[in-house]
Amino acid sequence: MDLSSINPILLLASLMVAATPILIAALGELVVERAGVLNLGVEGMMITGAICGFAVAVETGSPMLGFLAAAAGGALLSCLFALLTQFALANQVASGLALTLFGLGLSSLMGQGYVGIKPPPTAKLDIPLLGDIPVLGPILFAHDVMVYVGLALVVAVWAFLKYTRGGLVLRAVGENHDAAHALGYKVVRVRVMAILFGGACAGLGGAYISLIRVPQWTEGMTAGAGWIALALVVFASWKAGRVLLGAYLFGGVTVLQLNLQAAGVDIPVEYLSMSPYLITILVLVIMSADRSRAPASLGRIFHASG
Amino acid sequence: MFLYAASGNAHKKAEVWRRNLRNDNILSAEWGNSRDTRRSRTNPRLRLRDVIAGKGQYVTENLLTINGLTKAYPGVVANDTVSFEIGVGEVHALLGENGAGKSTLVKMIYGLVKPDSGTMTLKGALFAPSEPRVARVAGVAMVFQHFSLFDALNVAENVALGMENPPKQGDLATRIRDVSETYGLPLDPYRMVGDLSAGERQRVEIIRCLLQDPKLLIMDEPTSVLTPQEVEILFATLRKLTSEGVAILYISHKLEEIRALCDHATILRLGKNVGTCIPRDTSAREMAEMMVGSAFEAPARAGRDLGEVALDVTGLSLNSPGEFGTALKNIHFTVQEGEILGIGGVAGNGQDELLGALSGELQSDAEAIKLKGEPIGRMGPTARREMGLLSAPEERLGHAAAPDMSLIENALLTGAQRENLMNRGFLKWADTRSFAKKIIEEFDVRTPGPDNAARSLSGGNLQKFVIGREVLQRPEVLVVNQPTWGVDAAAAASIRQALLDLAAGGTAVICISQDLDELMEISDRFCALNEGRLSDIRPAQGLSVDEIGLMMGGAHGMEVAHV
């Protein structure tokens, strides 16, 4: 066992990279759930975003265009969910599960020609001065732009929900859709927009895995990240700040246990592999003991009457 | 005294007209005048009012004119060429049974529903709101009966959601404080709405409306959750508003309140305007009969002999299982065979918990509740049902009845033991069906048949079913919570009659209700729940409204509006 082989600076830096996909996907799902919609299709939208982003980045040579395509792909797939649940009034749980299965299949189909190819590399932001700070520089200021997009998204989602009219209406729709309707707000329109945002975020998160984190295309490569994002939203009590905490905790423990495995720690690999899930859930369960409630209309089908 | 709207069945109109002529001597003296005014097309109602009331107050301006509004849904015409007018600064009551079309009508005024035909004029201009925000901009505000507040948002956020161009949170909080002080409705803008009492929630709704300087305020059943003192404060606020020129369209089942508050009333029956009256000069009974379209029997109390003590509750204390619930604190009472004990109180003071403790959903100390001397505090609902203690909770859909199950299945759910509808774990569907049919027949439940889902019944009909289901099982003790909530006058009268008949047959009845008129009508003794404590129990006859209000805990920290 050689713990000295673990470099704490690299560890912390890779923590942010490991956390970013689930962070972005979870933020999207948070907005969807705050609007009162339970979309269990995050995994499907992520993997669809992963292949859309990968394909476009490879074809155009531009990772940024790849990310845009990933967001579009995720949003497009979520359109299907919006159509089923908001207009056909289908059950949200079943539709979401179907979306995941559909997304997994669709992505393998789309990705057939892309196995084994390397995507164009995404440039790291080399922020002058800040990046040169010892210790903090490499940890915080030497990442690719999507890491910061993820962080900015946390602030943006938090501020949108707390301080804007649109955010208030969105929370109102998720809290009590009948009342929101009675006051004249367009419940379905708000929810469709939230679902599209959630789809775009999931797509971005997926593309981060295929373009930066791994980076290559293999079938089923999101490997449950979408489900982690979903769980994170619940255990984070539908709060953006706690999603960040949960995502970084999960990313951190993941990276740490990989390092420990590499260092040959005397703990069975199975226990190490399950540790990120266990620890994240444990911490968030303890934190969510403050009785924060789910949005009251979560998962309920809205049918305008009269 | 009555004046007819332009529409409606001529024969029925004439009949009501004549009946009211007989009932109203003042009108007959002025008949010539009023008939003349009726012919004039301009504004007969207001001139008639001046002639008859002899008041110096001349209301010259019409705020809202509704002309021939019609709205049909598949299978039912909710509003059939309804016409009436609301004057500036007037309190106008809209009366009718459940399903008479009141809520469809106000939804059309508020822009939630588009009429099939007909027009509205607001302040002389054509008014056809395509959505509520258009109506709000035009000066129409609405206080809803249910579902328009958001529990997880604070007061200021709730208010902001009902406004077109809300100011910043800080400014809004200041304005909420200002308005709430001006109108005597104290309210903290930063409290969560989920933590507020029913009366406070209503203040949120009213303030939300007032901040938009409305010209017309629509109020749907505003007093159903208030103590008498709170009702007085509300009325003072409303009178202050009308003195400032705001018109109020007021929907309520409480006819005495309408008599106290409203200048005019329009009565709807089966979607049609069947008449207009001046509530001050019309008795509650006449108004109720106009709503129903025929005379109905008021519940009759037969003289009853009280028997043994059937239910004895001593020192019942219980924590509430719910987050926003009220704990019961040291409750004592007894009910004798053949007696009706009325328990009043504002919603949320422990009614649900008391019902739960008596029905067996919540368990307490064994000795705290005794049925015919036998301790039952530890028994569950099924065991208590077998012993003859039955109950009907307030929430019809979801608590008293399973919404998506048929009436047959719902009949089985509480009737299985006493009606012997099970045989070693197997269900006797034929017997259950005939039990359900019996309930439907004896309690005049209007439904195509017992196979229909509970959800498909109107509130009043489902309530008759729920009460009938328990009454027909010949309970020793029956506990009901809000037996006539949201039920129209005729159905309420028949439910109350059923309870009285049951008591006459020797059953001990505990009636928990927020409708004081109901409790005074049927109960022998009265007490009130206030924050989980039960007041002294006193004979119902001869209690004054003030005394009852004090038993209910007064006005819950409200001040009388400074008007």
Image: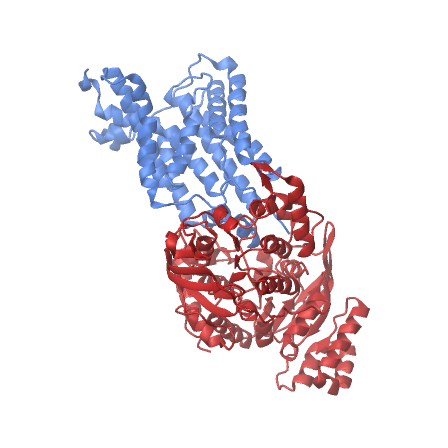
Chain colours: A blue, B red
B239 or A270: which is nearer to us? Answer: A270
- The residue sitting at 67% across, 41% down in the picture is B430
Q: Residue A84 falls in which quadrant of the image?
A: top right
Q: Is residue B345 visible?
A: yes
Quadrant of the frame with the N terminus of chain A = top left
Residue B332 at x, y percent in the picture:
40, 63
Above or below, A70 relative to A1? below
Locate residue B550, reporting x and y percent.
42, 73
The image quarter in which residue A102 lies = top right
Q: Is residue B305 above or below residue A305?
A: below
- Residue at 65% from the left image edge and 60% from the top image edge: B98
Above or below, B66 against A102 in this view is below
Q: Residue furthest right?
A: B11
Q: Is residue B255 left or right of residue B538?
A: right
What residue is shown at x 71% (from left), y 80% (from top)? B23
Residue A15 visible from this viewpoint: no
